[in-house]
Amino acid sequence: MEEVKGNKFAARVTQRELSTHKEIQTAKHPGGRPKKTDEIKQSEKVFLTLTKGEKAKLDEHTARTGESIAGAIRRALKEMGMI
């Protein structure tokens, strides 16, 4: 490996270029965020049918609070102790 004067990162870049994909993936710090655990991951879906009036009230509330529809429903369910 050639030493490049004036650039302290040159040796590091050359070393990275020589690494294989397998070496990068099995490195101590492969990069990216860790996968979410099953307790944290929100993967289940629920579908809800509302009247036009109910939907209008929900839209008005979310516009006023800046909350998403899913977030508002999730918060209401938590406040009622259902989830």
Image (spheres, helix red, strand yellow):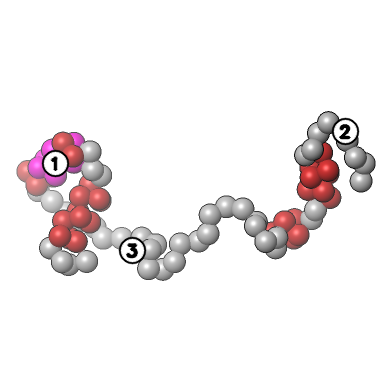
Query: Is disc 1 in contact with disc 2, using a CB cutoff of under 8 Å?
Result: no
Q: Count neighbours of disc 3 (C-alpha within 10 A) and say few if under 14, some if 14 to 19, many if 20 or more.
A: few
Residue type, numbered disc 1: His
- Magenta range: 56-63
The amino acid beneath tag 2 is Lys
**Badge 2 density bin: few <14, some 14–19, many ≥20, Cα 10 Å:** few
Check the image and name the residue furthest to the right: 2
Picture residue at 22% right of the left edge, 56% below the top? 74
Which circle marks residue 61 in the picture? 1
51 falls in the magenta region: no
Earlier residue among tags 3 and 2: 2
Counting from the top left corner in percent of width and height, residue 35 is at 50, 61
- How far across and down, in percent of the image, does residue 38 sit? 41, 68
Residue under pointer 2: 5
Q: Position of residue 79 (x, y in %)?
A: 15, 60
Residue in view at x 16 percent, y 56 percent: 76
- Measure the C-alpha gap from mark 3 to mark 2: 55 Å
